[in-house]
Image (spheres, helix red, strand yellow):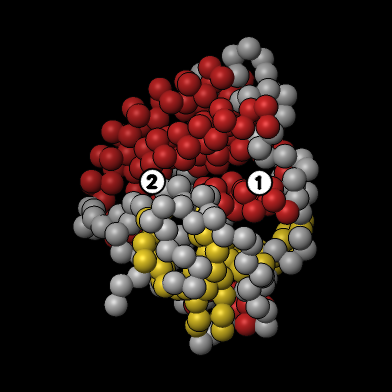
Amino acid sequence: MSDLLLHHYHFSNFAEKARAMLGFKRLAWGSVVQPPILPKPDLVPLTGGYRRIPVLQDGADLWCDTRLIALELERRHPDPPLFPAETRGAAEAIAWWAEHQLMRPMALFVSGINALHMPEGLHEDRARLHGLPAPSIEAVKAAGERNRHLVRPQLAWLAAMLADGRPYLLGTRPCIADFAAYHVVWFLRGRKIDCRAELDPYPALIAWRDRMSAIGHGARRETTPAEALAIARAARPAPARPSDPQTGDPRPGQRARVRPGDNARDWVEGVVHFVDAGEIALLREDPAVGQVAVHFPRLGYDWRVARD
């Protein structure tokens, strides 16, 4: 696992989830810092147009989305488990809620409160990601206040999960539910304006956050984007796992395209390397890196046969 690279940037909450999972697995990894907004000239050659952070790299294989990154880490290094069998169903449901219902208002709240202190171009870039026009600073600020009132009741739900004194959301050890919820709460630190006072009514939630933070990030080493491209160029994609196509799926060897379900623009196209109920991997060529395999989760993504 010492060859793993993580493409990320510091204030990305989803990158914090990946960093914390690497720490939980006690892994060494290379830190490849990418820009927070487009253009991303050292990431796009690897992913074929997928521009979100983080991306996990091992040689010429790239895993997109922290849901799939978690599953890949678990497949390679199952102890300690992110997905304990006895809580897996509840854990995955909590993780899905945290990342799809809590995260969006949290991001709008913290970014809105810090509207004047975010990196230049970030508000416009994020609007473009979702197919929206560039917002005014006043609109960003107003969205922050509106979404504060969507964040607060959901933080109360998290606190209620810990009300019986358990150290983690589903028991005595952390699981994927904790990592998915933690990175959302971590985002409250914001930028210049600290929003962590939202947790003050919930001492148990603060203690849980601090336990999660203490897990750390594992053994991190700095790696340049140029080194990451060279590593991919010198490698070949790992052999395909057995495929199990579902009804209507593109088959191995067919050309297909994949995009996040909430983004109508950023298609990644390639030849199906393997596909099963949880994952689809595309082989693609780029002059900068040669052949790479880009892996996507099925849930939350749109995939289809590519048409000329």
State the SS at label 1: helix
**Quadrant housing residue 63:** bottom right
In the displayed orientation, state which residue is furthest to the bottom. 287
Q: In which quarter of the image is the C terminus?
A: bottom left
Q: Which amino acid does label 1 sit on?
A: Ala
Q: Is residue 85 left or right of residue 157?
A: right
Percent x, y for residue 156? 47, 20
Quadrant including the N terminus: bottom right
Residue 26 x %, y %: 78, 49
- Residue in the picture at 52% in, 24% down: 158
- Residue 84 drawn at (x, y percent): 69, 33
Q: Which residue is drawn at 70% across and 63% down?
A: 4
Q: Is mark 2 on a helix, strand or loop?
A: helix
Position above or below: 14 against 224: above
Mark 2 or mark 1: whose residue is earlier in sequence: 1
Nearer mark to the viewer, of 2 and 1:
1
- Percent of width and height locating residue 90: 56, 27
Q: How crowded is mark 1: few (under 14 residues within 10 Å), some or many (20 or more)?
A: many
Residues at marks 2 and 1 touching, judged by CB atoms closer than 8 Å: no
* Number of marks in picture: 2
Give the CA distance from mark 2 to mark 1.
Answer: 22 Å
Residue 225 figure quarter: bottom right
Q: Which mark is residue 20?
A: 1
Give the label on residue 257, or none. Answer: none
The answer to which of 113 and 62 lies nearer the viewer is 62
Tell which of 67 and 279 is nearer to you: 279
Residue 240 visible in this rendered orientation of the protein: yes
Q: Which mark is residue 111?
A: 2
Q: What residue type is labelled 2?
A: Ser
